[in-house]
Amino acid sequence: MPKLVLAYSGGLDTTTAIKWLTLEQGYDVIALNIDVGKSREQPVVESRGMAAGAVKVRVIDGKEDFIRYFAFPALAAGAVYQDAYPLATALARPLLAKLLVDVAHEEGATAVAHGCTGKGNDQVRFDVGIMTLDPSLKIVAPTRENAMAREYQIEYLQKHGIDIPWGQKGPFSIDENLWGRSAEAGVLEDPWQEPPAEAYEWTRSAEDAPAEPAYVEIGYEHGMPITLNGEAMSAVEMVEHLNELGGVHGVGRIDHIEDRLVGIKSREIYEAPAAIIFHTAHRALEAMTLSKQQIKLKKYIAQEYAELIYNGLWFSAHHQDIAAYVASTQRHVSGTIRVRLQRGTATVVGRQAKESLYDRALATYDRGDTYDQSAAVGFINIWGLQTRVQARQQLLGQLPEALKIAMPREDA
């Protein structure tokens, strides 16, 4: 039988896929689980996969690689999709696609599979990533090809002697990893309705958060977080710490109407305490260390980078080009930012940078002021020359009489 590697979560869809791919498609299925953190199915992945008929279940700890090589580079880029979503699920998919291809090569598989539907974004991220890395691999998507209802899937497994005690389906569709949690469907499909309390798991409401704030100092080196409160930590440790601390203080809740790649608008509820805190601090550090022109262009690049990730183009040449630009912008983005966490907000309250462009001697109005104020008059005359010439030559005849009278004339 030909071998196939399945991206396996341990949930009902991909567990059913193991049996379906074996019986209906004739594959020896190798179930590959990539642990990117927070999966509630993680303790039972191996036992469920084998019970469903996989010839092998492989589990790879991808948490550190996920944060260090996917989430943190996106952070350095300032990539937030549509100014709201810090791209948790979207960032994990290229790692999963790469490891699917790697394991397929190791196992001598001719095909790979995933459990995505035909309605969402993940199918694009998986398929495009796999096609880019190895176009010779066949891609099978059982859920997309055979939209099976939950009840049918349970019956199908039971029919073939697999009686797993699946819990009652929750009110929402959930996806989570270390960088964030998403909830959709159910009552959330009504955009007028306020999300119920049970839509959130990682964060307290602002009303229930402590009145007393917490402070955290984040150290960055070339745009990448390296310390919390002066202590060096691994990437995973920093994210886990800020997820917990931010969640206690109600930080990281996002209620967003999002444009999916397939053309559908979707209401999404996100929780991303660490991501929100890191992004808030990183923007403040860039404000200290990047020039006005760099900040202006990088805002556009950040939007393009976020869309690139969201749209499944991580392995494209376009990404390589943008990543090179981002790396260049981060050469001097090193320093420490102090953030206050209080009742749903993350507020920057302190900044230090090794190569800061902020010069207190120029900014101050006190005696230490080194700014030459007399130079301002000449600057203003030169700066305003183009507008004065255009006003004289083109605009006066088009303005109301009152403005003509009020506007100074050089020949008056």
Image: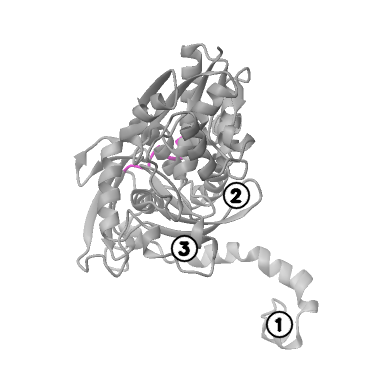
Q: Amino acid at mark 2?
A: Arg
Q: Position of residue 229 (x, y in %)?
A: 20, 47
Q: Is residue 328 visible?
A: no
The residue carrying mark 1 is 412
Q: Residue at x 58, y 18 (%)?
A: 26
The residue wearing badge 3 is 375
Residue 333 among magenta residues? yes
Residue bearing mark 2: 260
Q: Position of residue 317 (x, y in %)?
A: 60, 29
Say whether residue 62 is left or right of residue 269: left
- Region in magenta: 327-334
Which structural element holds mark 3?
helix
**SS for tag 2?**
loop
Residue 268 position in % (x across, y down): 50, 56
Asked whether, in this view, residue 98 is left or right of residue 357, the answer is: right
Q: Is residue 29 above or below residue 147?
A: above
